[in-house]
Amino acid sequence: MTDEIVRRCKRYIDEKNDSALQGFYEDIIDTYDTSNLDWPTIFHRVYLHACLRGNETLASWLHKELYPKMDPIQQIALRQIFPYGRHLIKRFKTYQSASNKVQ
């Protein structure tokens, strides 16, 4: 179940379809038994994928909207990914600007 959700979220990120991902989150809450989902794993994998793809808007939404809804223990376990996510976004921008200069 968790892998299926992560795959679908990653597909939305690759398609740059932020609104579909946000809508999918609402569908997850309404449809699935959320007590059985591994939210920290889902958040971790989706957040880092958004950062790898340079999607600052979605990374910010995940950080500001979904992260605070987790329990404090989960938040403590996940908080170290935010500096790494900022690093990935910065690296993506550097790579994009360098590849634009070559062309």
Image: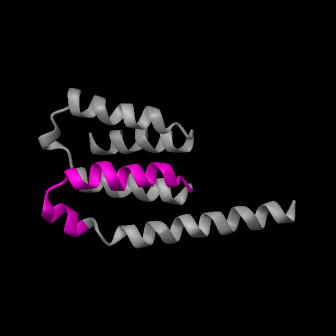
Give how far across and how far down residue 78 sits, in percent.
Answer: 27, 65
Residue plotted at (37% across, 45% down): 6
> Image quadrant of residue 47?
bottom left
Give how far across and how far down residue 41 sits, in percent.
Answer: 28, 55
Q: Is 35 situated above or below 51? A: above
**Viewport quadrant of the N terminus:** top left
> Image quadrant of residue 20?
top left
Q: Nearer the viewer, residue 46 or 69?
A: 69
Q: What stretch is highlighted in magenta?
A: 54-77
As drawn, the residue found furthest toward the front would be 64
Give how far across and how far down residue 35 sits, in percent.
Answer: 12, 42
In the rendered view, does 92 fall on the left or right side of 44?
right
Residue 67 lies in the magenta stretch = yes
In the rendered view, does 73 fall on the left or right side of 85?
left
Q: Which of 28 and 93 is in front in this view?
A: 93
As drawn, the residue found furthest toward the right would be 103
